[in-house]
Amino acid sequence: MVITARPSYSRIKTALTAIQKNEELELQLVLTGSALLNRYGNVDNFIEQDGFTINEKVFMVLEGGNLTTMAKSTGLGVIELSNVFYNLKPDIVVVIADRFETLAVSIAAAYQNIPVAHIQGGEITGNIDEKVRHANTKLADVHFVSSENARARVIRLGEDPDYVFNTGCPSIDLAAEVLQAPQLNFDVFEKYGGVGETFDFSHGYLVVMQHPVTTEYKDAAKQIQETLHAMYEMQMPVFWFWPNADAGADGMSHGIRAFREKYPLPFIHFFKNMRPEDFLKLLFNAKCLVGNSSAGIRECAFLGTPVVNIGSRQEGREKANNVADVNYDREQIKQAIHFWLHNARPDSSAIYGAGNAGVQIADVLQTVPLRYHKKINF
Amino acid sequence: MVITARPSYSRIKTALTAIQKNEELELQLVLTGSALLNRYGNVDNFIEQDGFTINEKVFMVLEGGNLTTMAKSTGLGVIELSNVFYNLKPDIVVVIADRFETLAVSIAAAYQNIPVAHIQGGEITGNIDEKVRHANTKLADVHFVSSENARARVIRLGEDPDYVFNTGCPSIDLAAEVLQAPQLNFDVFEKYGGVGETFDFSHGYLVVMQHPVTTEYKDAAKQIQETLHAMYEMQMPVFWFWPNADAGADGMSHGIRAFREKYPLPFIHFFKNMRPEDFLKLLFNAKCLVGNSSAGIRECAFLGTPVVNIGSRQEGREKANNVADVNYDREQIKQAIHFWLHNARPDSSAIYGAGNAGVQIADVLQTVPLRYHKKINF
Amino acid sequence: MVITARPSYSRIKTALTAIQKNEELELQLVLTGSALLNRYGNVDNFIEQDGFTINEKVFMVLEGGNLTTMAKSTGLGVIELSNVFYNLKPDIVVVIADRFETLAVSIAAAYQNIPVAHIQGGEITGNIDEKVRHANTKLADVHFVSSENARARVIRLGEDPDYVFNTGCPSIDLAAEVLQAPQLNFDVFEKYGGVGETFDFSHGYLVVMQHPVTTEYKDAAKQIQETLHAMYEMQMPVFWFWPNADAGADGMSHGIRAFREKYPLPFIHFFKNMRPEDFLKLLFNAKCLVGNSSAGIRECAFLGTPVVNIGSRQEGREKANNVADVNYDREQIKQAIHFWLHNARPDSSAIYGAGNAGVQIADVLQTVPLRYHKKINF
Amino acid sequence: MVITARPSYSRIKTALTAIQKNEELELQLVLTGSALLNRYGNVDNFIEQDGFTINEKVFMVLEGGNLTTMAKSTGLGVIELSNVFYNLKPDIVVVIADRFETLAVSIAAAYQNIPVAHIQGGEITGNIDEKVRHANTKLADVHFVSSENARARVIRLGEDPDYVFNTGCPSIDLAAEVLQAPQLNFDVFEKYGGVGETFDFSHGYLVVMQHPVTTEYKDAAKQIQETLHAMYEMQMPVFWFWPNADAGADGMSHGIRAFREKYPLPFIHFFKNMRPEDFLKLLFNAKCLVGNSSAGIRECAFLGTPVVNIGSRQEGREKANNVADVNYDREQIKQAIHFWLHNARPDSSAIYGAGNAGVQIADVLQTVPLRYHKKINF
């Protein structure tokens, strides 16, 4: 199991737990990519606190935050992970979703005749994620998808239906657990520090999570400023999560810092990262999630949290009725937030799973015949 | 246009010529992978003699000839080619077929938002080539395929039909040219040197070209010895081409050398490489091609040259009636050769193209709208 | 000429100019390492504005800011620069000083039998710079040193005296030029933006430039906080330059941000970078430079600017009488600043050169016999 | 302890044994470089048969056998070994001698503040080995040298005399052991296979071991052919060892193969590798060692075996009176062999050690204070 980024861990945590509990399976964990960078929150600490052992840590991300360094980081990842798999000799490698560095995982495994299981294939987004996701599907031997539509697409891509399993998305598992006791039972400021002033948010708050879009990375600073202006004009309490390491991240960070120099933002508090359970509680109790995070599309569908989804990053994804799509436009953003503030909370939706994906994944991993040889079936 | 291996150049030569002739297009040529290694024949000399300029040469192949070094070579290729494309700034990158290192080309281009054109997608073979080929398809924006079946498959893989062009395989172009004057009008021994004794082959000869199969690379030495035994027992003149750089190459080379130590082979002459035209003439005039080269499936279909195709490497490919499939078994190999020696030569077949692929590719490259953003269309 | 870091450019600028003016020499410029990272200021813009052409830009710095990523960045640099030199085919490569990535330059050149000229050998500092500097000397064929003591040491290290030239340090050339008209003839805030409030500094100001020490990188946050506390207690106008990319940089940045959250710092303005001439003017007119920058030891010696040199980074360097050494201790730092505020400005010193190094370097490069083969001479 | 090449293992074996026996020390073994390549003999099998555990195997050698791939292999080695050391966390890393890839070991360790011990510093050869060796010295903290002259030189290079230990060369230890029972008590052909006919060598034989010289790599094929001609004209039994992986290796292999095609060589048998003890016995009983191997300078000095040392590779090394230097010239080679055939065997010399280097190295490693911080002491 290779974890390459901050959100991947929370996505996959219940599967890790189920694998670890399964006596027939042995879990090996490799941490790499942005998951290792302090700048993006110490995921390794969270993982070890949760009782998992990290077998290898591999630095592979180049500085620069542009398209060239994204590509080169992936190349470096192939080299490093080839070594790691050569030495760990796993029976199967699990690769998650569609970030650029995940292709390094698939290549390092597939080229060494190690079966590859891919989670979250068959979805549609556009931009480089779209290419990476489907290339992962074509390099993978076993597929764990999140919806019936996704399963149909993976099969249409020529994969053997016997190896395509709609387990739902493991990220929903955690949301299902959290729904048992969704109260915000911790002090956000004290537990996570972060940057910015503290404030009273008992009358409602927003969460912002907006990542750079790699095909539009030159506009990153401009895009984030529309959101900042909207927040500035709303003057509501906001918990803001720092963007991830994609091309455009530097532009975005710079945009945020420049804005803060000009406009006082005492009602915004910035975080790098949060324990997944706590993050889901924060989402559940929010008036609205703003930005372009896939958590808005997936976890919030199950939680019933309203979402203002900005721009093109989630284009093509199946969406439940908790999502309002808007452009990079402060007015549209504000209007959509107002809509959610004055309307009823949407119902919980199971389009991305029913909450038992982790256990299903572990079961399949235990029983599926291992093979690394396949042919298109049409 | 990135050339990564010895056979890729002859495959693509007519397209290069057509691009160079097209005044609207500018050709940039990058040579890498095994195409640069002396051990596999100086492709760069041939290319420059043919009047093309090589813009960059990039060493990326690790020694070792095993699966791990194949993967690491690919990673190194991603790093290097990212740099090369960053500096050359091509409008589109053309990647050829399905060898392991071709994914390095696709990734380096796609991740930098450079459109990718892929040649020879939509075919079926099995083993790692199968995974690499279809992953290339999913990273590519424009597709040049070799047959109607291949076109149908690429479209079923979710690609936009407007961007999938059945040009036929450019390798057939050269075969079509050669068919105009197919006489063996050069002295094979004098022109290409090679290793082994010279002999009279005016009463007929065989050509052998057998590469390692990466999923069976541990059996490479054993597999090649069956072919060697068959040749030894046939005692017919043989022109034997050295295997390529895949995992198993070392085993195969070692197998050949060990055999030569034990058995005198005065009727076999070994070559590393040959100018494509000369190679096709040699094939046309041969009694039979023996081995697992894709030239047997493609060029020989058009030339009408009989083929004894050994083992699994070409499994799943469409084949014309010039191909007899056999196992790694000296008896089967001998029987199939005898069959061809005593039966009529098969007719020429156009299943892989009619001989004008190069011109069609150049035409499409000139007119196709460039884009690097796509979505699965189902 | 390979430039790997922000300060290297200003160090070497007069040599670049002299090389470009010399009709017998052709200048090729490669920009890499932290010199390419926006985070550390756009050196490439400055360079191009100064009329130089950058032949290649090579991204090679891994994120992480720790010792492992420093080492891996160097390895990546060797790979990339080998390619670059293979393609550019320089007659000689000039490598500057002793940062970790400079060994990548020396190796890529020396291993390809390209002569290496090294600037600033023979000095003493301790920590990894010390090892890197002398290893560079042993890989280099021509040596441009900054002082007579340095020349003596390079010769004692076994180098041929005919190839060791005391040109003085080219950084002093620029200081000599600036001394002709050292007035602060630009608006610091307007021209360089930066972060923090603007203020009146007509009654005197300090400049702070403090980099992480790689052998003490875990203490980076703590070390910088002593300086921050000293500044906070002084309440004088401060121009603060952001630390460089060494191991510890993340800790240091984090230390600065955390401090700013707690303590209002309206009298400090942060910059990433500045044109070298402007930076020297800023230094000349400062009451004192605080930190551990080598500019304090070299340029400030010539400018006669007082320096409070903190910690071990410049240990072992020859120092003129403009330098007061202190520990990482807010009290010592404040005392040393007070001393300089109440005592006469030191005289200009020429221990690091007389201001004509660039021209001397170009002259030697034109006339020195090129060789890449040497033997220790004892 | 990092072993990068075939001969390094035999050089260091007694030190490995002594470290393993020392209860205060824990041995970690990393195998990399050409030591891993089948083409150069399976060193890993020998090592494991000798009872050592290999902790990591790292592929890092690029194909191409030219200067550019030597440099790039070193860069890849830095990347890979940085990872390995990051995970193994050794207290000290031992690097051996002066091959190009050894700088990768020193950098990966030194940059991560891991103390480096260097074996065989302070010697003189010329060419890239010379640069690499002394650069290793400057990156190392502890020095194990082979002679008093070498010790004096390392100290003159600025190293602290307390950290420079003349232990003699560990390669001599094995020679000393072998001298106890130097009979050729095994069947050379049966035990080692190899390539070429078998023959009677009871009336005396020669051993040839000639490596490419990296600064003359373009002449590699021509150089080896002089030796081949000399052997062909001598018509004496010869055991010939295959050249190592340096730039020029491909040229050399090709030169040997081409020669064999033209001239029958039934009196030459080719080997890739041999167990060190057996190799030393073979050397002891030989009439003469021919080529440019350092074994001729070191082990043969102790064994009293005559040597015909060809060309520049060992230039500058201290030599005992068992060595006759000649040029790449078949006549000079033959004359020197004739001289040794008709003169008395030279006496054993201890200039490279007395046979207890391994134990001394282990003792020092146990007791020397570990540090990674040093300064030139003049």
Image: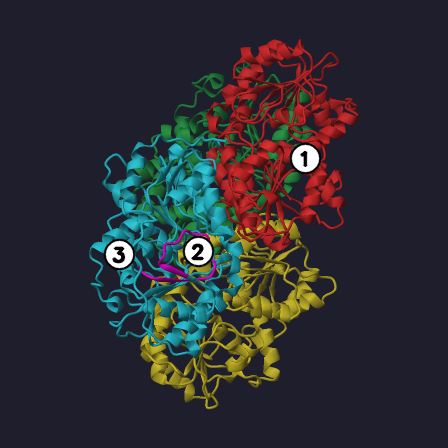
Chain colours: A red, B cyan, C green, D yellow
Q: CA distance from mark 1 to mark 2?
A: 39 Å
Check if mark 1's residue and mark 2's residue have beta carbons within 8 Å: no
Q: CA distance from mark 2 to mark 3?
A: 23 Å
Amino acid type of the residue tagged 3 in the rendering: Glu
Q: Is residue D250 left or right of residue D147?
A: left
Residue at figure coordinates x 66%, y 11% from the top left: A341
Outermost residue, bottom side: D203
Callout 2 crowding tier (Cα within 10 Å): few <14, some 14–19, many ≥20? many
Where is mark 1, residue-wise? A170
| Residue B18 visible | yes
Check if mark 1's residue and mark 3's residue have beta carbons within 8 Å: no
Residue at figure coordinates x 54%, y 84% from the top left: D187
Q: Chain of mark 2?
A: B
Q: Which mark is residue B277?
A: 3
Most prominent secondary structure in the magenta stretch? loop
| Residue D138 visible | no
Q: Is residue C136 left or right of residue A305?
A: left
Camera-nearest label, 2 or 3: 2
C278 vs B120, nearest the viewer: B120
A223 vs A350, nearest the viewer: A350
- Where is residue C243 drawn, in percent x and y? 56, 32
Q: Chain of mark 3?
A: B
Marks 2 and 3 share the same chain: yes
A118 vs A79, nearest the viewer: A118
Magenta-drawn segment: B305-324
Q: CA distance from mark 1 to mark 3?
A: 56 Å
Callout 1 crowding tier (Cα within 10 Å): few <14, some 14–19, many ≥20? many
Where is mark 2, residue-wise? B314
